[in-house]
Image (spheres, rainbow, N blue to C red):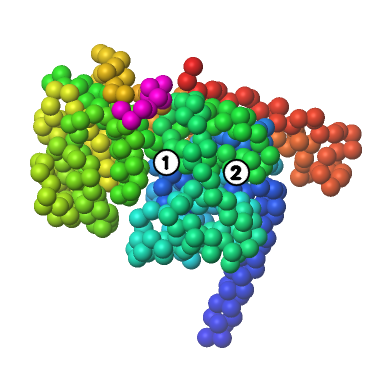
């Protein structure tokens, strides 16, 4: 018995030592990245991460980024990206250790990384142990994840504040609970910067080939300013940045019966406030029109959110509401009795998605608009795949006959141009013993092998981990660093509208 106790004790000591070694190794990787930006909040984190990274790249800063939203991506300093492979499809904040280690091989000026923790305690661990950000971003406080961070929005604000850097800077676009964020920032000796979305002009928004909000752009500009990047240079970098796969988009289809359909995928905005804001902006821009049809996808593990989506149906003023997924009763019961439109229940987790899609299309008029809200997973993903199989409608100008309404500048219509289907593409299967699968998109080109890239950057920067290292910077005595090591990158391909 004593022998077993000794074995257990030795195992515990071994694990303790291994943990210390791993932690010190991780902190050493963090020290190689002078600026670390942690993006947190409820809605828009992935888009803000891409905007911040694009703005810093525009300022000639070597920047690595990682998103976690609709599709997790590792974004290289040249703007190309790869999907992040996860065993069994499960996400865990421990993956941030590998991301930091991989980012450090580039010796970057900055790392922009999206927070993937939800539980308040994990958010603090993510900040204090994994990222140790120097600049924090807290984009907004919305009604989501109330089970973990709630039950009130004030509680959500305090929970999100646990990711603020102690003694650092935090940028936010939140207005309603700014006083709570300021209180939490003062506790951490953190300087809170509140941005004004109205400082972003309509002309600057017109440079984007994808839909975004002034709040997101204002946050990215503030981060760029903190790092010494000029405004116009930062805007150019953001214009050239590829959009997130889950970005808000409007597609125009033709159904098998010849009906014209404008479809807006608003699944990414899966809280009531963001959903209403997205739909209202699309309507103001003329991207969708009345009569409006709404598809609500339900999930068994998001019953509360299903009810929230049902409760806002009168605010959407929908003509017909289609309920898909399971359990649809949670959304149907939340629809107020005052709603005068039609409710079509097509729920069921085992229902054929093609049958569901055909039933929905059969109920539409000859020219209709439809928005999909709620949760994308489950029947929502299958519904999008079925719609993607429909032919695109190219019979008319997308903006022909758009009402002027509210004095909007007609030129801003270009931000909702039809885009290629990115969100529906599944990442290729990873190679054996590789945690990242290569990806080529319309916004990127071939990505070299990771070892090849690391060797190239080490040689370019004159840094080496092997023999021949002669000074504190890792440069051999016979060599000096190039005048601009960033010239070793290929220029990213522009995605800005002509």
Identify which residue is drawn at 54% across, 23% down: 494
Q: Which residues are magenta?
A: 405-414
Side (left or right) of 25 relative to 321: right
Q: Which mark is residue 223?
A: 2
Q: Which of the 4 image quadrants contains residue 143?
A: bottom left
- Toward the viewer: 99 or 454? 99
Identify which residue is drawn at 78% across, 44% down: 466
Query: Where residue 144 sits in the image (x, y, percent)?
Result: 35, 55
> Pointer 1: residues within 10 angstroms few (<14), some, or many (20+)?
some
Query: Where residue 454 sits in the image (x, y, percent)?
Result: 67, 37
Q: Can the viewer see residue 264?
A: yes
| Residue 410 belongs to magenta span | yes
Q: Is residue 178 above or below residue 207?
A: below
Single out the residue that lies furthest toward the front. Answer: 407
| Residue 335 belongs to magenta span | no
Label 1 sits on a secondary structure element that is loop
Label 2 sits on a secondary structure element that is helix
Q: Which mark is residue 71?
A: 1
Work out whether mark 1 precedes mark 2 in sequence or the reverse, and give the earlier one.
Answer: 1
Give how far apart the Cα atoms at labels 1 and 2 are.
Answer: 24 Å
Query: Where residue 351 sits in the image (x, y, percent)?
Result: 15, 43
- Toward the viewer: 119 or 189? 189
Q: Can the viewer see residue 306?
A: no
């Amino acid at each position: 018995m004593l022998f077993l106790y000794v074995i257990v004790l030795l195992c515990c000591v071994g694990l303790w030592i291994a943990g210390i070694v791993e932690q010190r190794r991780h902190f050493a990787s963090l020290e190689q990245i002078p600026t670390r930006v942690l993006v947190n909040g409820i809605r828009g984190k992935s888009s803000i991460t891409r905007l911040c990274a694009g703005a810093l790249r525009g300022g000639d800063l070597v920047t690595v980024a990682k998103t976690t939203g609709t599709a997790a991506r590792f974004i290289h300093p040249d703007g190309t990206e790869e999907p992040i492979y996860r065993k069994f499809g499960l996400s865990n904040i421990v993956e941030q250790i590998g991301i930091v280690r991989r980012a450090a091989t580039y010796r970057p000026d900055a790392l922009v990384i999206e927070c993937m923790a939800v539980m308040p305690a994990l958010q603090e661990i993510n900040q204090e142990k994994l990222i140790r950000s120097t600049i924090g971003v807290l984009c907004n406080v919305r009604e989501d994840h109330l089970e973990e961070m709630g039950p009130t929005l004030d509680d959500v604000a305090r929970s999100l504040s646990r990711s603020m850097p102690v003694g650092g800077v935090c940028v936010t676009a939140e207005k309603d609970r700014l006083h709570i964020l300021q209180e939490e920032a003062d506790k951490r000796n953190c300087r809170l910067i509140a941005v004004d979305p109205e400082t972003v002009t309509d002309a600057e928004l017109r440079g984007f080939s994808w839909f975004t909000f002034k709040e997101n752009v204002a946050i990215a500009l503030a981060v760029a300013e903190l790092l010494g990047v000029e405004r116009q240079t930062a805007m150019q970098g953001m214009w050239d940045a590829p959009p997130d796969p889950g970005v808000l988009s409007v597609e125009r289809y033709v159904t098998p019966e010849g009906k014209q359909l404008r479809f807006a995928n608003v699944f990414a905005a899966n809280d009531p406030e963001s959903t209403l804001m997205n739909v209202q902006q699309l309507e103001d821009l003329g991207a969708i029109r009345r009569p409006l049809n709404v598809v609500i996808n339900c999930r068994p593990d998001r019953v509360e959110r299903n009810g929230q989506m049902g409760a806002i149906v009168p605010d959407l003023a929908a003509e017909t509401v289609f309920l898909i997924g399971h359990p649809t009763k949670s959304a149907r019961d939340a629809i107020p009795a005052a709603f005068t439109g039609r409710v079509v229940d097509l729920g069921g987790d085992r229902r054929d998605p093609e049958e569901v899609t055909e039933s929905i299309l059969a109920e539409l008029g000859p020219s209709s608009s439809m928005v999909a809200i709620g949760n994308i997973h489950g029947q929502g993903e299958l519904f999008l795949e079925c719609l993607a199989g429909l032919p695109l409608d190219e019979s008319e100008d997308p903006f022909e006959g758009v009402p002027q309404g509210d004095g909007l500048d007609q030129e801003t219509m270009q931000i909702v141009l039809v885009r290629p289907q990115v969100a529906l593409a599944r990442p290729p299967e990873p190679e054996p013993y590789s945690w990242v699968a290569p990806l080529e998109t319309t916004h990127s080109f071939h990505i070299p092998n990771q070892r090849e890239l690391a060797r190239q950057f080490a040689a370019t920067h004159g840094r080496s981990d092997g023999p021949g290292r002669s000074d504190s910077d890792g440069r051999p005595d016979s060599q000096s660093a190039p005048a601009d090591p960033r010239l070793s990158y290929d220029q990213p391909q522009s995605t800005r509208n002509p």
